[in-house]
Amino acid sequence: MSVSVIIPTIGRRSLRQATLSARQADELVIVVDKAAAETKELEVADHPAVKVISVVGGDHGYTARAAGMAAATSTHLAFLDDDDVYVEGAIDLMREVATDRPVIFRMAHPEFGMLWRVPELRFGNVGTPMFLVPNDPEKLGEWTPHAPTLDQPGGDFTFIAGCCAAMGEPEWREDLIALVRPPERASDVSIAVVTPWMNHPELVYDYTVAMQAGRPDELIVVDNGSEPPLAFAEMRFSNNRGFSPACNAGLTHAESDAVLFLNNDIRMRTPDWLETIRGAIEPGVLVGAKIRYDRHADVDGEQYPYLDGWCLAGYRMELLGIGGFDETFQEPAYFSDNDLCLRARAAGMTLREVKVGLEHLLGVTSGPPDAPAKVAACDANYERYASRVRELVG
């Protein structure tokens, strides 16, 4: 099986990133729409088999895509806009699953989140960056508007529906392969995501999707003795050492400017979630999804705010400077986030809440809230935290 990626362009600078993400394709077909071109000079990543052709379209890339299909020579066709990108490994996955029927993967959209939502061929639920189709000219659909009055008139839906009508029902895949208009990097701050993990294979899919969309500079999953071992872990302990030791191991292992401690029980809402955090990080600041004022924040009638530990970030050297998480808190390590934030504030740091495009699936990994061992650990950890508050504030 071979794959040609067809990319219509109006000459955006983002074309280089698009072509770079498709570098594993057997053939790249770049089609310049002269009717809407922004520049005459194209920025295209190096590729051994690239074709550049020109058309006069001005019709949302429909003429350009049709011309690209006519020029493509691979057994299968894939499509990418010049401001979209494939995730790492997307082309290899296409080759692996290519068949004599269309294949519809998933893509992350900046406005609509994850598409598809349900495996259903309908307008608004599918798009060409998620589509792989056999290169059978007699059975390919036509690029015509589905809803001509809309800003995005849906020629991709018309094309996909036409292919499926001629070739048979598509194969629906849950794999994320493309990011539609991925967010620009918010700053030059590099970020390592550190995630302790023990068992719970059911969380892998949502977590992986979030990482593929967020694209951290480093991903450090610390396997806390999972059985079977996690294939994607950067570090592994032979037994469960707990949340805080795993976080600290990842913190020490990281090389990026900043570290984001992130739970594994998360689900992506918007693909720009990590850039929101990146843009908020600065020296002397801890960043997180929620500053909490609740019973966990109360000591002797005073509120001591803290960032919820499921999503908490800061500069690596500053986190190391305050000692990371206190590993003496009992598991599950409730109040360890309170304690970390307390010590950070005592060192002159501030807490900052940002709206992160992630959902925390509460209680998935820590067990029932009324489990005796969990209640006992919470009580003991609160006493330890309260003692530290009294020690620091007098």
Image (spheres, helix red, strand yellow):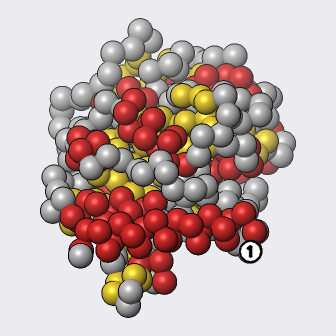
| Local crowd size for mark 1, using a 10 Å CA cut-off: few (<14), some (14–19), many (≥20) | few
Front residue of this view, candidates 363 and 191:
363
Location of the N terminus by quadrant is top right
Residue 91: percent from left, percent from top: 57, 26
**Residue that appears at 49% across and 71% down:** 383
- Quarter where residue 131 is shown: top right
Tell me if residue 121 can be seen: yes
Most extreme residue toward the right, as rendered?
168
Front residue of this view, candidates 235 and 392:
392
Residue 394: percent from left, percent from top: 23, 76
**Residue that appears at 30% across and 25% down:** 44
**Residue that appears at 23% across and 65% down:** 345
Numbered disc 1: secondary structure: loop
On screen, residue 265 above or below 346: above
In the image: residue 290, left or right of residue 129:
left
Front residue of this view, candidates 352 and 10:
352
On screen, residue 139 above or below 362: above
On screen, residue 39 above or below 296: above
Residue 90: percent from left, percent from top: 57, 31
- Quarter where residue 42 is shown: top left
Name the amino acid type tagged 1. Asp
Residue 270: percent from left, percent from top: 47, 61
In the image: residue 91, left or right of residue 322:
right
Q: How many marks?
A: 1
**Residue that appears at 71% across and 29% down:** 229
Mark 1, residue position: 370
